[in-house]
Image: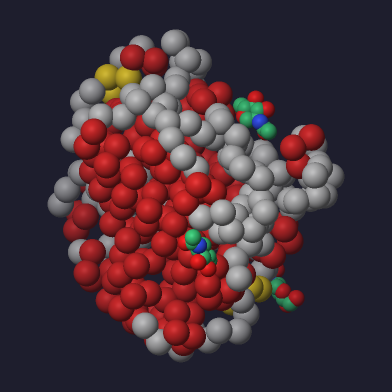
Amino acid sequence: MFKLSLVLVFLIAFSGIDASPIKYHNPSCSGNMSATDVDLVHFAMNLEFTEAEFFLKASTGKGLDAFNATLAKGGPPPIGAKKANLDPITNRIIEEFGYQEIGHLRAIADMTGGIPRPLLNLTRENFAMFMDRAVGRRSNPRFDPYANSLNYLLASYYIPYVGLTGYVGAIPYLVYFNIKRISKPKQACGGSFGGGIGSRRSNKALLYERQNEKVEEYGGVTVAELTNEISNLRNELGMCGIKDEGLFVPLWLGAENRTTSNILSANPYSLSYDRTPQEILRVMYGTGNERRPGGFWPCGANGRIARMFLDERYHGNYDACSDGKN
Ligand SMILES: *[C@@H]1O[C@H](CO)[C@@H](O)[C@H](O)[C@H]1NC(C)=O
Ligand SMILES: *[C@@H]1O[C@H](CO)[C@@H](O)[C@H](O)[C@H]1NC(C)=O
Ligand SMILES: *[C@@H]1O[C@H](CO)[C@@H](O)[C@H](O)[C@H]1NC(C)=O
């Protein structure tokens, strides 16, 4: 299935999509935006920064700047990220994901110059707020993504998975862009695409193994139930129908209609669901509004696409945003 989707992506990449402006036609769900390959890839960098910081800090205790001080392009360091209390295996996997993210960021920066890292709110409180919202009640004790492996995986389920679906919109163009510009299709595919999808899939697999475990902070709700709640929240905020699924899906949405487990979320042709930049902004801002920043990106995401939507009225709401760097 995975190989098939790669092939399909290549077909899409080569089937006459040109590098000039891409138009989104669905008005309510995609607006009327035109963007270049570089814009789309820059947009994806917002997610890459978020993942890089969350993964690296949780597994190594060090953020992106400790590994490469120039990639952030002067963007502020994240708020609230810290070393998580992870078991050794989870720690190793998350560390690996972190390094993959550095690779993606470097590849994009080298090819396009990149964008400044947006301000990231990776505080325990922010994750707890999103989780509480998904479940519909306040956690007790307060949900802490950094407290243990299970909580960490649940928390990362919110971000990386958006990353996956977000990429599907931009990645054919990224692959295309790479091939066009540096003529290394294998690297473009295995590095940026395969790596990203693979890591998110194993992330989901780690949770799948623990589907029946209970999450104490929510009075014994199971992991399976909680991931479904998180998916529901993302769909609600994205406002464009079902774009992702929890660990279990109704039979009619499962792979080849024969399974109810759902490790790699996909549409009926096993291509991953697509999310437009606007939907990703709504989900990551937590406001359901691409013009109104908040949530994980309190000062807004960076790059031309995100900035085009951003309503300046909301920009600078926080002291942290008014330093001119965002
Ligand atoms: C998109 O913009 C074009 C040109 O401005 C316009 O003709 C078209 O009606 C717009 N479509 C939607 C769905 O708004
Ligand atoms: C940091 O990333 C930039 C952009 O890809 C690259 O040019 C530079 O060599 C990297 N620095 C280190 C120390 O890896
Ligand atoms: C980070 O998120 C928490 C919880 O939502 C919030 O209280 C805090 O003000 C946020 N920080 C910034 C800079 O947005």
Name, please, the residue furthest toward the left.
258
Q: Is residue 218 shown above or below 307? A: above
x and y percentages locating residue 264 in the rendered image:
28, 52
Seen from the viewer's position, the closer of residues 284 and 51 is 51
Residue 124, how many percent across, how many down? 51, 25
In the image, residue 302 sits, relative to residue 38, either above or below, namely above
Observer-nearest of 230 and 36: 36
- Residue at the location (39% across, 38% down)? 60
- Ligand 3 quadrant in view: top right
Numbered label tally: 0
**Residue located at (47% from left, 27% from top):** 131
The image position of residue 133, as x and y in percent, is 52, 26
Asked whether residue 250 appears in the rendered view, the answer is: no
**Residue 166 horizontal/vertical position (percent):** 47, 57
Choose top left, top right, bottom left or bottom right for residue 150: top left
Coloring scheme of the render? secondary structure
* Residue at image coords 80%, 50%: 324
Inspect this view and state whether residue 142 appears.
yes
Q: Residue at x 19, y 58 (%)?
A: 256
Assign the N terminus to one quadrant of the image.
bottom left
156 shown above or below 221: below
Q: Which of the 4 image quadrants contains residue 109?
A: bottom right
Relative to residue 130, is residue 302 depicted above or below?
A: below
263 left or right, relative to 284: left
